[in-house]
Image (cartoon, coloured by chain):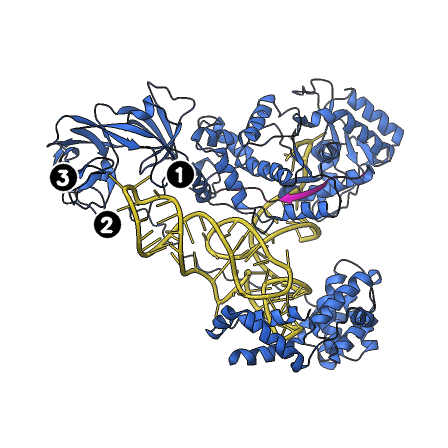
Amino acid sequence: MSEYKDFLRTIVEEDLKAGKYKEVVTRFPPEPNGFPHIGHAKSICINFGIAKDYKGHCNLRMDDTNPTTEDTRYVEALKDAVQWLGFEWDNSVRFTSDYFSQIHGYAIELIKMGKAYVDSVDEEEMRELRGTVTEAGKRSKYAERSVEENLDLFECMKNGEFKDGEHVLRAKIDMGAANMKLRDPLLYRIRHAHHFRAGDAWAIYPMYDFAHCLSDYIEGVSHSICTLEFENNRDIYDWVLDSLQLQPPRPYQHEFARLNINYTVMSKRKLLELVETGVVDGWDDPRLPTIEGYKRRGYTPESIINFCDGIGIAKANSMVDVAQLEFCIRDDLNTKVPRVMAVLDPLKVTITNYDGAEEIEASYYPHDVPKEGTRILPFSREIYIDRADFSESPEKGYFRLTPTQSVRLKYAYIITFEEAIKDAKGNIVEIKVSYHPDSKSGEDTSGIKVKSAIQWVETNTAKNVEVRVYDRLFKNEAPEGLEDINPDSLKVIKTALIEPSVITDKPDVRFQFEREGYFYADPVDYTDEKPVFNKIVALKESSAKKKKTPQQAPKDEPKKVQIDGEVVPMSEEEQALFDKYTNELKLNSEVANTLARDAKLSSFYEEALQTLDSPVAIANIVTNDVARELKQVEISELKFTAKDVAELVKMVNEELISSKIAKQVFEEMVKSGENPTSIVEAKGLVQISDPEMIAPIIEEVIAKNPDNVEKFKAGNTKLLGFFVGQVLKATQGKANPKVVNALVTQALKV
RNA sequence: UGGGGUAUCGCCAAGCGGUAAGGCACUAGUUUUUGGUACUGGUAUUCGGGGGUUCGAAUCCCUCUACCCCAUCCA
């Protein structure tokens, strides 16, 4: 693990350090209503990964609160995904449905507390009553029902005495809440549906917002990690747990940005559409970003995990480049799998001066992969090479066989072009070459220099295989729908040829086909009679080999001009205050503006002015530092007073302390409410301005950092800050920065 | 439009007042019987824009802009 921790791990560490929890408990809580994709993998890696890192545990919980969409087949797929990635969940798989009784009990408690009620308006009316983002909603008349009536109704709901939709149980929170989620959210709805686990035991089912937080609590989860779109739900999460006054410790929710990858889609809805319309061949289609898809394509769990670890965790919506995923699988397979020769687009080659046959022993692994293993390559007069490895009229920089350029057959001989045989249309159907008997690999005395060694297979012994070449499913980086499908996302090559050992010896299921890419024996369709290989990923290609790839036309987007919005005009009083500040007190307009527009700030400012007549200095500290504190709280809640601030400014004015120390003192005032003078005294923060005392420290710093002195003298003037910082650090911030600055500048000039 | 989030290289992403980490991609070179791998180097005078505070700002303050989420009896 590197130096830094992602923000989730930082939170976990702090909580552990603070003793908030004895153990970290996380959970991976999918709803079993769809197949897991690589976005789930990210969540799995985060939840199980954090549990592992901090020696806690992670539960696998099926969030099965909606009987109409969920199914046990998805449960199996989800379990498989976690296992395939190599994680172990704590105990057996959990199900929210196992907690239905407990959750129901909590609902009754809430009703008894008067914090939940049975509402009986229909859906449409409820929507209307909810209000809009800018207008408050109104509570329905049913909110006034008595506790007894609510209890009774809720019991009847549970017993299935009402039809779907007739009643719901809602939390009584606030219909005017700015957070729409808090406008009396639904807790339970009636669903006369068969639940795949609970059967027909229940006629009511809890909603996500009610069930999730309680399930977390029941399981003793410490950190409930979910994606960004649940940020608004956090308030309900907290409301439920707080209202129920549950015994601590209780879980807290933290959100991260979900994974997006370009040229693919990740939403259940879009994935389902692809499968249902038959655009892809089932949930395990290798072009899909589903776990099943990657698995079938040949990706390894390690590569997926490395990918998830590599992309980091943050709160900014982002779209990761598939190239990063491709890197991970290449990187993993490079050191693992055997190299073999396959020819995808065969071109017949006759070696006119070769007779008979021979067997060549060749290593499965290149020199830089420390693995053992060899196979026999049959060789004879007739072989196949890839069509792309011969060019009659090569472009500049072409390394392979041409009429004038010889090439090596990997592990075998160097061949030289003689003649191209063409059909009636002028297509090359065969080429004739001659070989150099003294150029055999490993015992080459020919002295011929070639630029490249190409793969080949021997005609009589090569096996015919089917190769499925996959490309990105969509042609757009951020596909919208089916219209963005890449029509060439799958190419089936039925006439590919492969060296015999791959089929007969089966050294592995994943291979590198030399110079082509990594391939995987399809776990479903492969048979020895009809071998099928999926292309996992191509080898990286240097730009020289890439054939005139359409150099993504550099779209010269006009540089976006940032439009400045209009600032709300000041009210008359604000304007008067602003004028007074700028004219009488000589504040700069920015500071005056901030002060004038904020009543809290200006009143605080005026009060401080009464103690000390230093309008500019006080204005600066009030607008910058006091403002930060006043963002959250009222003046009356501050631990320090305007008088304290004035006193602090006075010390700065008298150069008793530097502004840097002043910040430090201010921090302390915020925390403890201590008087600034006593803080300065207690901590001995008086500033050092005497050059005599500072100079030796500077010398020391300079002596310790010869490299940076060099760089500075070479023109890296930014380093001045570094030196000043070092000196300040050495004096615990007490040195007068202005003096230090001047002194350092002088010292470095020499 | 009210609320909640987010903006650092082409793509991810560290950084929390004192020298703009790292990975992917790109690029140049060395090694190489894979145009692969490995290795070495090059890639942000600047952190969404503008102001302010400070000796010093990606980091603190003000302000503007852009994007995402919220008005399912889905999760």
Name the residue carrying label 3.
A417
Q: Position of residue B74 (x, y in %)?
A: 66, 32
Name the residue carrying label 1.
A334
* Residue occupying the point 55% across, 29% down: A81
Q: Is residue A45 magenta?
A: no
Name the residue carrying label 2.
A397
Marks 3, 1: nearer the viewer: 1
Task: Find the magenta span and give its range.
Answer: A248-261
Which label number is shown at residue A541? none
Q: Are labels 2 and 3 on one chain?
A: yes
Q: Which of the marked residues, 3 or 1, is nearer the chain's N terminus?
A: 1
Q: Secondary structure at mark 3?
A: strand
Marks 1, 2: nearer the viewer: 1
Q: Is residue A65 left or right of residue A674?
A: left
Query: Dot 1 surroundings within 10 Å: few (below 14), some, or many (20 or more)?
Result: some
Mark pair 2, 3: CA separation? 18 Å
Q: Is residue A571 visible?
A: no
Q: Is residue A566 above or below residue A547?
A: below
Q: Colour of chain A?
A: blue
Q: Is residue A353 above or below residue B32?
A: above
Q: Which of the marked residues, 1 or 2, is nearer the chain's N terminus?
A: 1
The quadrant holding residue A79 is top right
Q: Which chain is yellow?
A: B
Q: Secondary structure at mark 2?
A: loop
Q: Position of residue A231 (x, y in %)?
A: 67, 44
